[in-house]
Image (cartoon, rainbow, N blue to C red):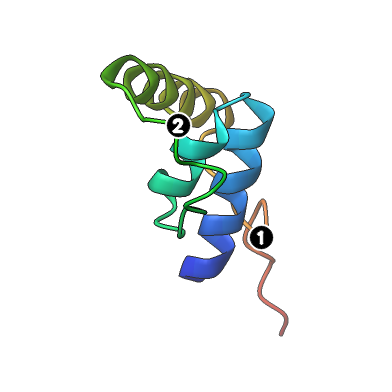
Amino acid sequence: MVFHDHQQTQKTSLIEDDVPRVLRLERLRHKRNPTDDRYSHVTESMISRMLGQLQHRQELEGGWSWISEVPDKVE
Protein backbone atom coordinates (compact mmCIF):
# COMPACT_ATOMS: atom_id res chain seq x y z
CA MET A 1 0.00 0.00 0.00
CA VAL A 2 1.39 3.39 -0.94
CA PHE A 3 0.86 6.61 1.01
CA HIS A 4 -1.82 7.90 -1.37
CA ASP A 5 -3.90 4.70 -0.89
CA HIS A 6 -3.70 5.11 2.88
CA GLN A 7 -4.75 8.75 2.59
CA GLN A 8 -7.80 7.85 0.48
CA THR A 9 -8.79 5.09 2.91
CA GLN A 10 -8.45 7.46 5.86
CA LYS A 11 -10.50 10.16 4.12
CA THR A 12 -13.27 7.66 3.43
CA SER A 13 -13.21 6.55 7.07
CA LEU A 14 -13.40 10.15 8.28
CA ILE A 15 -16.39 10.83 6.03
CA GLU A 16 -18.13 7.65 7.22
CA ASP A 17 -17.55 8.74 10.82
CA ASP A 18 -19.11 12.18 10.15
CA VAL A 19 -15.89 14.03 10.96
CA PRO A 20 -16.38 17.74 10.15
CA ARG A 21 -14.89 18.90 6.84
CA VAL A 22 -12.58 21.42 8.47
CA LEU A 23 -11.03 18.66 10.62
CA ARG A 24 -10.72 16.26 7.65
CA LEU A 25 -8.84 18.93 5.70
CA GLU A 26 -6.47 19.58 8.57
CA ARG A 27 -5.92 15.87 9.30
CA LEU A 28 -5.09 15.14 5.65
CA ARG A 29 -3.08 18.38 5.32
CA HIS A 30 -5.23 19.68 2.50
CA LYS A 31 -5.62 23.38 1.82
CA ARG A 32 -8.60 25.08 3.39
CA ASN A 33 -10.78 27.41 1.36
CA PRO A 34 -10.43 30.85 2.97
CA THR A 35 -14.00 31.79 2.08
CA ASP A 36 -15.78 28.58 3.12
CA ASP A 37 -13.63 27.81 6.15
CA ARG A 38 -13.26 31.30 7.57
CA TYR A 39 -15.64 30.65 10.45
CA SER A 40 -14.70 27.01 11.10
CA HIS A 41 -12.15 26.04 13.71
CA VAL A 42 -10.74 22.74 14.89
CA THR A 43 -11.18 22.14 18.62
CA GLU A 44 -9.49 19.71 21.01
CA SER A 45 -12.83 17.95 21.47
CA MET A 46 -13.14 17.38 17.71
CA ILE A 47 -9.61 15.99 17.52
CA SER A 48 -10.14 13.73 20.50
CA ARG A 49 -13.39 12.31 19.09
CA MET A 50 -11.84 11.79 15.64
CA LEU A 51 -8.81 9.95 17.06
CA GLY A 52 -11.09 7.76 19.16
CA GLN A 53 -13.14 6.85 16.10
CA LEU A 54 -10.02 6.05 14.05
CA GLN A 55 -8.65 3.92 16.91
CA HIS A 56 -11.95 2.04 17.22
CA ARG A 57 -12.06 1.42 13.47
CA GLN A 58 -8.45 0.14 13.53
CA GLU A 59 -9.25 -2.25 16.39
CA LEU A 60 -12.36 -3.59 14.63
CA GLU A 61 -10.85 -3.97 11.19
CA GLY A 62 -7.30 -4.79 12.19
CA GLY A 63 -5.92 -2.64 9.41
CA TRP A 64 -6.34 -2.83 5.69
CA SER A 65 -4.65 -4.92 3.05
CA TRP A 66 -4.95 -5.53 -0.69
CA ILE A 67 -4.87 -9.26 -0.11
CA SER A 68 -6.28 -11.13 2.86
CA GLU A 69 -3.83 -14.01 2.81
CA VAL A 70 -0.54 -14.96 1.23
CA PRO A 71 -1.06 -17.15 -1.85
CA ASP A 72 0.41 -20.65 -1.86
CA LYS A 73 3.72 -21.08 -3.57
CA VAL A 74 3.34 -22.42 -7.13
CA GLU A 75 5.85 -25.11 -8.06
Residue at the image position 44 percent from the left and 52 percent from the top? 28
- Residues 54 and 24: in front is 24
Looking at the image, is mark 2 or mark 1 earlier in the sequence?
Answer: 2
Secondary structure category for the residue under label 1: loop
* Crowd band around label 2 with a 10 angstrom C-alpha radius: few (<14), some (14–19), many (20+): few
Q: Quadrant of residue 71?
A: bottom right
Q: Is residue 12 above or below residue 3?
A: above
Count all numbered tags in the image, as a single digit: 2
- Let me know if residue 14 appears in the view: yes
- Residues 35 and 31: in front is 35
**Pointers 2 and 1 in contact (C-beta within 8 Å):** no
Where residue 8 appears, x then y in whole percent? 61, 56
Q: Is residue 46 above or below residue 33?
A: above
Residue topped by disc 1: 66
Where residue 19 appears, x then y in whole percent? 55, 27
Amino acid type of the residue tagged 2 in the rendering? Tyr
Question: Is 34 left or right of 47, judged from the image as shown?
Answer: right
Q: Which mark is residue 42?
A: none
Residue topped by disc 2: 39
Where residue 30 appears, x then y in whole percent? 46, 58
Residue at the image position 52 percent from the left and 57 percent from the top? 7
Residue at the image position 62 percent from the left and 61 percent from the top? 70
Secondary structure category for the residue under label 2: loop
- Let me know if residue 64 appears in the view: no
- Residues 23 and 13: in front is 23
Amino acid type of the residue tagged 1 in the rendering? Trp
Q: Residue furthest left?
A: 44
- Residues 57 and 41: in front is 41
